[in-house]
Amino acid sequence: MDNNLEKLESVLKNIRKYEKLGLDTSYLKLFIKNYKFFLDLNNIKPDYSDSQRFKILEEILNNRQLFPKISDIIYFSNFNLGVEFKSQNASREVTINRIIKRAEKDEAFRNILKSKLSNLISMGHYKEQKLTSTSKSINYNDLEEWAKMLKDI
């Protein structure tokens, strides 16, 4: 997401409480909508900082619908990324941090990670998870948004 767009949406979120008191935010909402359309129309890619890029990767790896168990993350890493995690004794957070740190150091690894995650999302892995677990609802919008963001980073 564009930094300016993120700031605009943050401002809108912060002033929502004043709508009940009579503040008209419709022009700001319309402007944000038009700004998004302008960015899409002109194919303007968002400018992510390195920390934002790795935060996106971390959020995707941390998604419990995509990787419900730590064993799923380890399996994905071992067979798709060439990482050899031998045990599952480390916590989910530690395992994800190891993957992110390696991606920060090695650009080839980062590109492989991005492409494998994109493939996983585009193949509908999260939709298969949805079919097997009826009690959990998966936010497809987040995953689709991440798929778009992976293309940009």
Image (cartoon, rainbow, N blue to C red):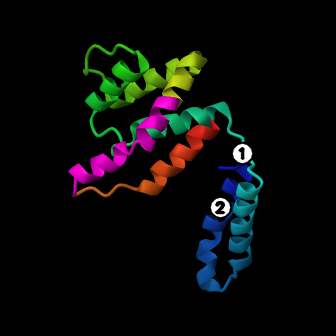
In three-dimensional space, the C-alpha distance between marks 1 and 2, rounded to whole angstroms, equals 18 Å
Q: Residues within 10 Å of mark 2 (few under 14, many from 20)?
A: some
Which amino acid lies under the numbered mark 2 shown in the image of this protein?
Answer: Glu
Rendered location of residue 136, percent (x, y): 27, 55
| Secondary structure mainly formed by the magenta segment | helix
Residue 3 falls left or right of residue 134: right
Residue 12 circle label: none
Q: Quadrant of the C terminus?
A: top right
Q: Residues within 10 Å of mark 1 (few under 14, many from 20)?
A: some
- Please provide the residue range marked out in magenta: 115-134
Residue 61 in magenta stretch:
no
Q: Nearer the viewer, residue 119 or 133?
A: 119
Q: Nearer the viewer, mark 1 or mark 2?
A: 1
Residue 128 falls left or right of residue 112: left
Residue 9 circle label: 2
Say which residue appears at 21% left-offset and 49% top-offset: 132
Say which residue appears at 35% left-offset and 42% top-offset: 125
Rendered location of residue 15, percent (x, y): 65, 70
Say which residue appears at 63% left-offset and 77% top-offset: 18
Q: Residue furthest front?
A: 123
Image vertical order of residue 5 relative to residue 77, above or below: below
Rendered location of residue 23, percent (x, y): 68, 82
Residue 117 falls left or right of residue 36: left
Rendered location of residue 12, percent (x, y): 65, 67
Image vertical order of residue 14 relative to residue 1, above or below: below
Q: Nearer the viewer, residue 89 or 73?
A: 73
Give the mark, 1 or 2, whose residue is nearer the N terminus.
2
Image vertical order of residue 82 relative to residue 100, above or below: above
Residue where numbered disc 1 is placed: 45
Q: Nearer the viewer, residue 150 or 122?
A: 122
